[in-house]
Image (cartoon, helix red, strand yellow):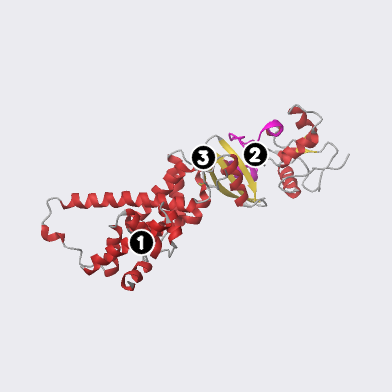
Amino acid sequence: MRLPPFQSLVDAHASELHRFLVASVGPTDAEDCLQETLLSALRAYPRLRDATHLRAWLYTIAQHKATDAVRRSVRHRSEDLDGVNPGHLAEPPHESADEALWTRVRALPPKQRAAVIHRFVFDLAYKEIGMRTGTSEEAARQNVATGLRRLRMEVDR
Amino acid sequence: MTELEHPLSRLPASAPFDANAAASMLAQRATEGGLADVAYGWLDSPLGKLIVAVTPRGLVRIAYEREAEEEVLRELAEGVSPRVLRAPQRTDVARRELEGYFAGTLRAFDLPIDWTLVDGFALGVLRATARVPFGHVATYGEMAASAGSPRAARAAGNALHINPIPIVVPCHRIVPASGGIGGYGGGEDRKKFLLELEGAIPAWEPSRPRQ
């Protein structure tokens, strides 16, 4: 099987993967996540059996790295809050409506989060979203719908 | 619905991305982790831009710009390892020696060679070629004989034509027994330039006079 030189994947997809990760984990952690994604991909690359869905494969890895990063940051936040005066727990006052929405997107379950991002940031069809999230087309549609419903409920609250 | 979807499609806006910085960070971390099986960079030479590729075992490829970069990298991916990364610093030693050679200050390369891209008779011919010293020439027949097939001069010529490491494995020093400088994978003008650089042929003469 013929795999293209790994650098050609980096050159073709790094910028979009970065955008996906900014949407998934925020701008601060996106760069680290991108490096983790590319390193993991590079490590596994020679053992790949299928060279036809390399982009979808990279997004699946990025989604896992994003999930790890979100878990880590949630853990950090709760550690930071130990022994903090509850009066300081209010939302930061300067967060815009868009930022608040993205904070909630990042808190969605991993597959819903990835599906919503692929749908609205990249404007992808459900079939492609399914490939990139490792699910069927139908499950991708479901993930987007459930994710949106959840976001809307929180907005309305 | 739109009140949600509109902001979703608009973000993330404020996220500049430096592709070069990300690629060199990856190259560095991959090298540290032993994952950069093939590293490549470029060199501006009097013979045009050269692609220089190395592996942990040594220099594996030099390509003149007449070969498409995409092709060269694909060949490395298939012939050596698909873990091909742009990591110019890894090629620094080879690039410095090449610069010295073109500047006339270095006559013998001291670079380990990775022969992965060559095998069989061609490997014998190229190993013999690697022993022809600076400023000297040898014939295709002599290289064929060194590789164990004295009558295979033409096959030796073919092997030299597809030498993956020109300049350092000096296929330009191999000429026809019948006279003239013969062909060159990188083009005859480059062969002439290299032979003149080494003083193997006088710089004012288009080629060695026919016998």
Identified by mark 3, the residue type is: Asp
Can residue A132 be seen here?
Answer: yes
Q: Mark 1 belongs to which subunit?
A: A
Q: Which residue is mark 2?
A: B168
User: Residue, x 77% and y 28% (percent of image)?
Assistant: B149
Q: Which residues are magenta?
A: B97-126
- Residue B37 is marked as 3
Q: Residue at x 56, y 36 (%)?
A: B58
Front residue of B61 and B49:
B61
Q: Position of residue B107 (x, y in %)?
A: 65, 37
Q: CA distance from mark 1 to mark 2?
A: 57 Å
Q: CA distance from mark 1 to mark 3?
A: 40 Å
| Same subunit, tags 2 and 3 | yes
Would residue A98 be found to the left or right of residue A56 on screen? Answer: left
Mark 1 — residue? A144
Q: Nearer the viewer, residue A62 or A110?
A: A110
Amino acid marked by disc 2: Val
- Element at label 1: helix
Question: Callout 3: 10 Å neighbours few (<14), some, many (20+)?
Answer: some
Image coordinates for residue B108, horizontal then vertical, percent: 64, 35
Residue drawn at (11%, 60%) of the image: A87
Q: What x and y, as percent, mark residue A120?
A: 39, 65
- Residue B44, position as x, y percentages in the image: 60, 51
